[in-house]
Amino acid sequence: MLLCPLLILAHRVSYLHCFIHCIRPGFLSQRRGLLGSVVYVMVTLAWTGLLFCGSHYLTGSWDFLSATHGVILTVPDLTPNVGLFWYFFTEAFEHFRVFFLCVFQINAFLYVLPLSFRFSEHPVFLAYVLLSLMALFKSYPSVGDLALPLSLLPLWSHTFRYLRYTLVVLCMFLMTSVLCPVFWYLWIHAGSANANFFFATTLAYSLAQVFLVSDVMYSFLVHRYDLCHGLPRVDSHGHTIALALR
């Protein structure tokens, strides 16, 4: 999923290199940017193939693929976690498993292309959004998966004034952080609760992630619109005012 923002970043770096070195912009710079993107893809595929071949050489078989990438794609282990997969596939009928497995897995990649087109000029922000979606739609997520996108949030602190659901998101994260271990203990150790209690908190945790990433995207887009076109502002008396830069 992160290949798209990295490709966009490589293309922009190549274009910037042409501009800095006074190379005439136009077809030549675009061609060089495209060449840089192709080289990046080839290097990525080469290193990936080298790692696979090295793993095959060390283990003597290709079984490591089913034990690593295969586990993520097929979801054979339904141990409860903070994700969405385990409860659904525990309740789903076995003959529908392949269909819903494809739906769940495709859902993780469904947003890559539209988001890449929309945020093509902002590859770092695109990487943040895709990291948030990866933390949300992983087969076996953990609380630590959210740490990386959260650590990137201060990069766009100038857009926080446009956030709408800050209090809701903070309360949901706080509530789920407290209730998840409580319901886990009541379900697994005390035996006085069932799986629905724990899954409800994990569902609220996932919903908080959805609210967070959607609100950050909204604030980012509104900030860009405000810079280009301006937003109507009112004073303390409710009258519309116009800002003038001096």
Image: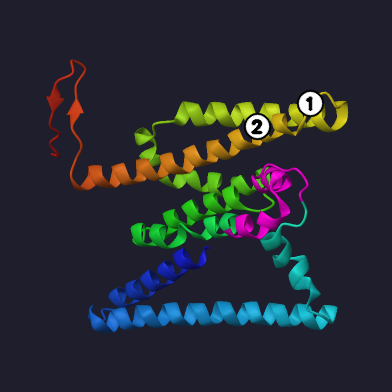
Q: Is residue 87 magenta?
A: yes
Q: Is disc 1 surrounded by few (<14), some (14 to 19) or many (20+) residues within 10 Å?
A: some
Q: Which residues are magenta?
A: 78-102
Choose top left, top right, bottom left or bottom right for residue 30. bottom left
Q: For mark 2, give the secondary structure.
A: helix
Q: How is the image coloured?
A: rainbow
Which x, y percent locates residue 203? 61, 36
Amino acid under disc 2: Thr
* Residue drawn at the location 48% of the way across and 59% of the way down: 110
Q: Which mark is residue 201?
A: 2
Q: Is residue 234 above or below residue 159?
A: above
Q: In the image, which is nearer the foreground, mark 2 or mark 1?
A: 1
N-term-proximal mark, 2 vs 1: 1
Amino acid under disc 1: Ala
* Residue drawn at the location 20% of the way across and 29% of the way down: 233
- Name of the residue lying farthest toward the top: 237
* Residue drawn at the location 87% of the way across and 30% of the way down: 189
